[in-house]
Amino acid sequence: MPSPQDARGGKRILITGGAGFIGSHLADFLIGLGHDVSVIDNLSTGRIENISHLIGNPKFHFCRASVTEEVVLDRLASQSDIIFHLAAAVGVALIVERPVHTIETNVMGTEVVLKAALRYGCKVLVTSTSEVYGKSAEIPFREDNDVLLGESGKSRWAYACSKMLDEFLGFAYYREYGLPVILTRLFNTVGPKQTGHYGMVVPRLMQQAMRGEPITVYGDGKQMRCFCDVSDVVPALASLVFHPDAPGQLFNIGNTEEISILALAERVKGVAGSRSETVFVPYSEAYAPGFEDMQRRVPDTGKINRLLGWSPKLSLDEILVRVRDCMAAPGGDDQ
């Protein structure tokens, strides 16, 4: 993977959703490389605590606003060379409970970003999601695989569809207008500062284990997932945006170490030193009736590895220890 030196140069960078979990880590990383970073976030799911240590830094600027506010976004884009577009509706709970918000935030927000980027000639990296693969059984998921989504009457799939439309928009702006757009699909990014408020499984389980509360596993717990630490994901995003061959392409970013949610719960209990009991919660109680889930979600990361030489460094056990230690720190258990 290109060294951090390759990404130096004092660029003006805008991060949408930059007070969120991934966005705040990305802001830290880019400022560490010497770039000027502006963040726009309406704090609906992002947290000011994630970026409070940066306020007052001359290389950091924060604007509290929605990415769909075109006048504000236009001004920020006019002052930027690169845009990382991370602002989106996040978390299964939020997606199921607020489908209108999900669709409008994802699709309209991306359209506003791409229009502004085209106006001022900004390079754009758009973060999409592994949810786009839907119920596909072609494991591991490769970027050029067909996708299989559920019926439109189930709001779970509105998120996947809206993010796929974001991808179509990104490709369209690249092909029709020549705008340098890079697309990424993230697979279950976890790590310090992630909140469990919106259904994120690792911080939710760790918090329950550390408090001695029952650990809630949704469904039968046999669904398989892969978890990648944010400290591995952020350098991948930065390296892609600075690589001359990345525009016009789509890349999976994730870990290939697979584990069932039930086994994850046991692993979390071990790391936390917890004796919490494991309780199974039907999907119908955790989410809206008729909720659907995918059984496996495993990325093929060969494409990004071939371009950057990138692969994740941290194992799942190392990731869980980082999450535990963050929660154990003063003020950390309010995640």
Image (cartoon, helix red, strand yellow):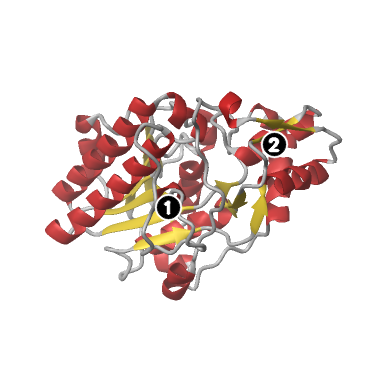
Q: Which mark is residue 269?
A: none
Q: Position of residue 169 (x, y in %)?
A: 23, 49
Q: Which mark is residue 133?
A: 1
Q: Helix or strand or loop: what does disc 1 sit on?
A: helix
* Left/right of residue 69 with respect to residue 14 in the rendered view: left
Q: Which label sits in the foreground, 1 or 2?
A: 1
Amino acid on which the number 2 mark rests in the picture = Leu
Residue in the image at 54% along x and 27% along y:
287
Residue in the image at 58% along x and 34% along y:
195
- Specify the quadrant of the image occupied by residue 315: bottom right
Residue 87 in view (yes/no): no
* Left/right of residue 179 with respect to residue 253 in the rendered view: left
Q: Nearer the viewer, residue 318 or 329?
A: 318
- Specify the quadrant of the image occupied by residue 151: top left
Q: Helix or strand or loop: what does disc 2 sit on?
A: helix
Amino acid on which the number 1 mark rests in the picture = Tyr
User: Local crowd at mark 2 within 10 Å, few (<14), some, or many (≥20)?
Assistant: many
